[in-house]
Image (spheres, rainbow, N blue to C red):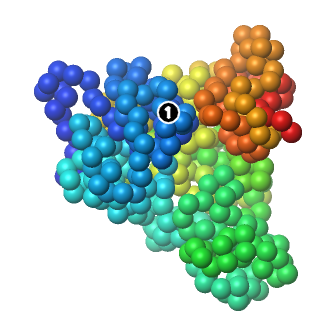
């Protein structure tokens, strides 16, 4: 049973007035862009708020505003006229979202959920309190604390920022006591709150997208495997090649994790599978997620559309795979350069490729510029074909 506070109950003014809803999305990156595209297919209008005018979502939304999303006055003025507010990232402070709720705007996920998730140490504490398996972790305030943790649990270990970390920004692996200083400096030399976590010797990294609706309905997408390089997701394969019992266990853990933070909307749950068959929760993403991009073509209803359906209380869509195999590959910038990739003409000659370019203003090394998805009948064949096609697309100059 999902318990929804008064501030979460959706305004039905649009229904009474016989119009389609206006959804406000805080953030203007590629996740907001793809949410807006899904909302548009359902006839909804979308308004976004971002710190810059030139962002991926700006070209596809009804209205785009530039402003500081952590300034309550800016948020409240921007939100006027919206039927509900949702997010594309976890960087909007929960206190700012609470001000929106206090002003009568429904926010999904709620400020209470974001308070439990956006600080990853608090997130881990909540999961642990609910009896869910997570790697051993501890808050640290000095290099000596890190050394003591390593001496107690062994090396390597991972030093992480409690907030504002994503795509490898905010993590540093410490392989021995001698590398503590380098990691400490990379993480701000104590300027930001940090925690340390035991390194998990995983054999696979798993992810599940879970959707919980304000109506009380819920659903999950298939368990996928993600391949990371330098803490950035490069490849997602669906379904993951694990046995049925492990898939069932991973899905159940993902559901329990989302329930632990009273999540609403679409959330990503990242997990580790160990050699012994144990599954540990790595972290939660309180939003649509990179590991779910494959769902646009591989499922009857994408993570983006189901997120929109869930926050409106509309019936959730089918999350099954339309083909036995789906592969998504992130297209990263190799260096500085224009946003149009080299090789686009060659790649699009293949009738099976589903190419998404995010509309960013320029390429930079390691920047997510787009992704491509292939679906097929055989995983190995589909994977090799996707890798080959992705290699033809080059953003920027190496």
Quadrant of the image occupied by residue 348: top right
Residue drawn at x 20%, y 28% as measured from the top left: 14
The residue under label 1 is: 57
Quadrant containing the C terminus in the rendered view:
top right
Q: Is residue 366 visible?
A: yes
Residue drawn at x 71%, y 18% as measured from the top left: 353
Q: Is residue 241 visible?
A: no
Q: Secondary structure at mark 1?
A: loop
Question: 120 and 36: which one is in front?
Answer: 36
Question: 28 and 119: which one is in front?
Answer: 28
Question: 332 and 138: which one is in front?
Answer: 332
Residue at the limit of the structure toward the left, as seen here:
16
Residue 23 image offset from top left, x and y in percent: 33, 35
Residue 38 image offset from top left, x and y in percent: 45, 26
Residue drawn at x 34%, y 20% as measured from the top left: 43
Question: 392 and 323: which one is in front?
Answer: 392
- Position of 325 compared to 252: left or right? right
Relative to 43, say whether 156 is above or below: below
Residue 335 image offset from top left, x and y in percent: 80, 41
Residue drawn at x 48%, y 56% as measured from the top left: 91
Relative to 277, say whether 241 is above or below: above
């Amino acid at each position: 049973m999902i318990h929804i506070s008064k501030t979460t109950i959706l305004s039905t003014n649009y229904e009474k007035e016989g119009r389609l809803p206006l959804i406000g999305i805080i953030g203007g990156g590629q996740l907001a862009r793809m949410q807006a595209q899904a909302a548009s297919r359902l006839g909804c209008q979308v308004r976004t708020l971002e710190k810059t005018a030139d962002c991926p979502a700006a070209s596809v939304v009804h209205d785009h505003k530039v402003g500081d999303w952590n300034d309550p006055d800016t948020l409240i003025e921007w939100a006027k006229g919206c039927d509900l507010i949702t997010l594309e990232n976890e960087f909007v402070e929960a206190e700012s979202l609470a001000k929106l709720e206090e002003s009568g705007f429904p926010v999904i996920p709620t400020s209470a959920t974001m308070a439990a998730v956006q600080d990853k140490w608090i997130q881990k504490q909540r999961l642990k309190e609910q009896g869910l398996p997570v790697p051993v972790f501890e808050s640290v305030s000095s290099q000596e604390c890190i050394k003591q943790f390593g001496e107690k649990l062994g090396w390597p270990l991972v030093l992480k920022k409690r907030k504002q970390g994503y795509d490898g920004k905010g993590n540093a692996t410490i392989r021995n006591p001698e590398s503590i200083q380098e990691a400490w400096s990379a993480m701000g030399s104590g300027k930001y709150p940090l925690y340390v976590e035991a390194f998990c010797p995983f054999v696979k990294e798993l992810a599940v997208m879970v959707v919980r609706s304000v109506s009380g309905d819920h659903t999950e997408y298939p368990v996928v495997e993600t391949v990371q390089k330098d803490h950035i997701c490069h490849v997602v394969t669906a379904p993951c090649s694990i046995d049925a019992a492990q898939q069932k266990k991973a899905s159940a853990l993902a559901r329990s994790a989302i329930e632990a933070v009273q999540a609403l909307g679409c959330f990503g749950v990242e997990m580790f599978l160990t050699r012994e068959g144990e599954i540990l929760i790595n972290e939660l993403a309180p939003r649509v997620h990179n590991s779910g991009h494959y769902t646009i073509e591989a499922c009857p209803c994408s993570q983006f559309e189901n997120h929109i359906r869930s926050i409106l209380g509309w019936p959730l869509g089918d999350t099954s795979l339309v083909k036995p195999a789906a592969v998504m590959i992130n297209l990263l910038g190799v260096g500085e350069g224009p946003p149009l990739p080299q090789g686009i003409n060659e790649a699009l000659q293949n009738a099976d490729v589903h190419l998404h370019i995010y509309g960013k203003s320029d390429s930079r090394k390691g920047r997510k510029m787009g992704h491509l998805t292939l679906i097929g009948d055989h995983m190995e064949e589909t994977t090799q074909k996707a890798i080959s096609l992705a290699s033809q697309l080059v953003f920027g100059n190496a």
